[in-house]
Structures are given as structure tokens and as C-alpha cells.
Amino acid sequence: MSGAAVRSLFALPPSPAPRRWVATRAALSIGVPSGLLALLGHEEIGLQAAAGAFVALFFAGAGAAERAKALPFVAAALVACAALGAALAPWPWLLAAGLVGVAVCASAFAFAFRVGPPGPVFFVLSYGLAANITAVVDGARLAEPGAFLAAMTCGSLFSYLVALTPLLRRAERARPVRPLRALLPGPWLGAGERELLLRIAIVAVIGTLSTVAMLDPHRAYWTVSAGIAVIGLTPSRGFAVGRGLHRTVGTLLGAALAVALAPLSAIPLLLVALLMLLQFGIELIVVRNYALALICITPLVLLMTAAATGTPDVSHAAGERVVDTALGSGLAVLTGLIHRRGA
């Protein structure tokens, strides 16, 4: 099993479906709002709006008319998670409790309604990013929560509109459209979903308590999101081992890339171009090699958070992400023992 996991690091199987337009939509969703606001001299607000680009990652393989039906529910959930993170940011223990609640509830929502890839991880990331961007430092917020949520909501709306642009083509409008009930079936949890939810709850509780006690409450979201990503959408021991290895190796290399790119990110428009390129790369290769995708995901989040909070040095945060990822991934792999062999 471990040998197969190591070999998978170097594998690049063909994509199950074309990803170029999915990647293009994701890149435009993150780049256009941040780029326009950077040109107007409001680059920090633009990067806060870029958090709304997570909407573009869901229902990527569905038709545009189907995305029009399903994505508002995803966007509302993402903004709600961010709002809770911003509200609880001043109180570390409440923030930690909220993280566990968001991890479990967002996972239950994603599994019960069969939201599909990328699963619940970006709901947790929205919560954590909001808490970090609006954190209290020396008695003052780094960013006003209301302004951040307004920017993220606008970014989500733009991402939603980008997802609908294929409807401009007659061929796209002619595609059959499934009802919302078929796009978001449920709510119900089968045995596999209940196992995944249990494992995520274990990772959320232990990961949060460990990070709060030993490290920093504001870092716990990365530990938990790493664990959730490793658990994934498949209840399997082998899947968790492989995913954990990809997550750790990809984050390590991605952290190094973030440090290398940090000097370039000091130029607002160049930073926007970097974020677009990274987002495009993520969506192009994530279904082929998860470690390669993490090499892009890690600097994307680090550079975006650093710029949105006005923190020029990312080297310290990059090192923290490696530690947090190793902890979250290790916990997730251990929870794979819950899954019975051969089941």
C-alpha cells in the first residue's frame, strides 16, 4: 500500500474529462475582481473578494444551467462559514469550538446532499481565512469584518456569473437540465458517509485541541482542513495513506514555492497574475495528481492571506503550514483504521 502511494506521487494519469475551461473559469473568478480593485488602488479589498472564487470550484463538471441552480446554496454556505469565522476571531476558544462545528456541519451538508468535489474542505478554509484576515492584533482588527464579508460576497457573485457564461452559447442552453432535487439529492447519509463524518469529527476535535494547546488557535483551521482533504470523499485506508502523502509532500514543496514567489507578490498586479496562474494550475491538474495541485494550492492561500492582511513575510507562515499539514494528515491517516479491511 505504501509503495503504491509513493509511486502515485510521480504518476500523471489522463484527466477523466477536459479541464481547460474549468481552470479558466476559476482563474477569472479569482483574478478579475482582485485585478480591477488593484488598478483602483484597493488591492487588499480585491484579495478579500478573491476568497469568493471558491464558489467556482463546485459543480465544475455540471452544465451551466445546473450550476445556476446549485451554486447559490454553496455560495451561501461559504459566506456563512466566513461570517462565523470573522465573528469569533477575537476569542480563541470560541474560534476553536466554531472550527469543530463548521468542520462537522459543513461535512454533513456536503455528504448528505452529495455536493461532490472538492467536498467540505473549502468551507473550513473560508472559516479560517476569514478569522485570520479579520483577526485582532494589538486591540484592533486587521480588516473590518463587515467590509471583508461584503467583498467576499461580491467575489462570490462574480464567480457565480462567470460560472454561467457558457449559457451565452446556444449549444449550452440546449443541454438537458436536471432538477435541483437531482443535483442536491438528500439529505441522507449512507454507511460510507457516516464513517467519513465520524473520521472528520475526530480529526476536527483532536486537530483543533492539539493546535490550540501547542501552537496557535489561528492555525488550527489549516490542520483541520488538511485532515479533511486527506480523508476526502472515499472511505478507504489506502486512499487516506496516499492522500496524506500527497498532501504532506505537496504542501512542503508548495511552501518553498510560496517563499520563492513572495518578492514578486509585492507588486499588486503581478500578485494577481500569480494567483490566476496558480488557480489555473490547480484546477487543471487536481484530478490527475493531488501533490502537484498542492504545490499550487499552498502558495495561493499563503500569498493571498499575507497580502490581504498586509503581512509581507510569508516564510514563517510557510513553515507553520508544513507542520500543521503533517499533523492534520497524520491524524486523518490514523482515522483510516476505522475502515474495515476489505470493506
Image (tube, rainbow, N blue to C red):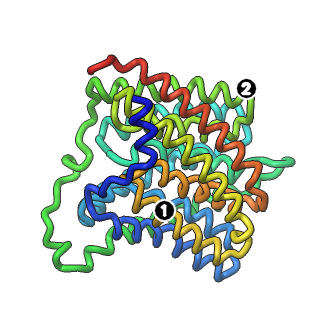
The amino acid type of the residue labelled 1 equals Ala
Q: Position of residue 177 (x, y in %)?
A: 16, 61
Q: Residue furthest bottom?
A: 39
> Which residue in the protein does label 1 denote?
53
* Quadrant occupied by the N terminus: top left
Q: Locate residue 260, reporting x and y percent.
A: 69, 62
Measured along the vertical axis of the image, is residue 222 above or below residue 97?
below
193 or 288, nearer to the observer: 288
Q: Is residue 173 left or right of residue 51?
A: left
The answer, for residue 154, to whether it is visible in the render is no
Alpha carbon distance from label 1 to label 2: 32 Å
Residue type at the position of mark 2: Ala
Residue count near mark 1 (Cα–Cα under 10 Å), binned few <14, some 14–19, many ≥20: many
Which quadrant would residue 257 be assigned to in this image?
bottom right
Looking at the rendered structure, the number of numbered marks drawn on it comes to 2
- How far across and down, in percent of the image, does residue 310 sit? 76, 62
**Residue at image x 54%, y 73%?**
33
Kindly state the secondary structure of the residue where label 1 is placed.
helix
Which label number is shown at residue 213?
Answer: 2
Q: Does residue 54 sit above or below 155 in this rendering? A: above
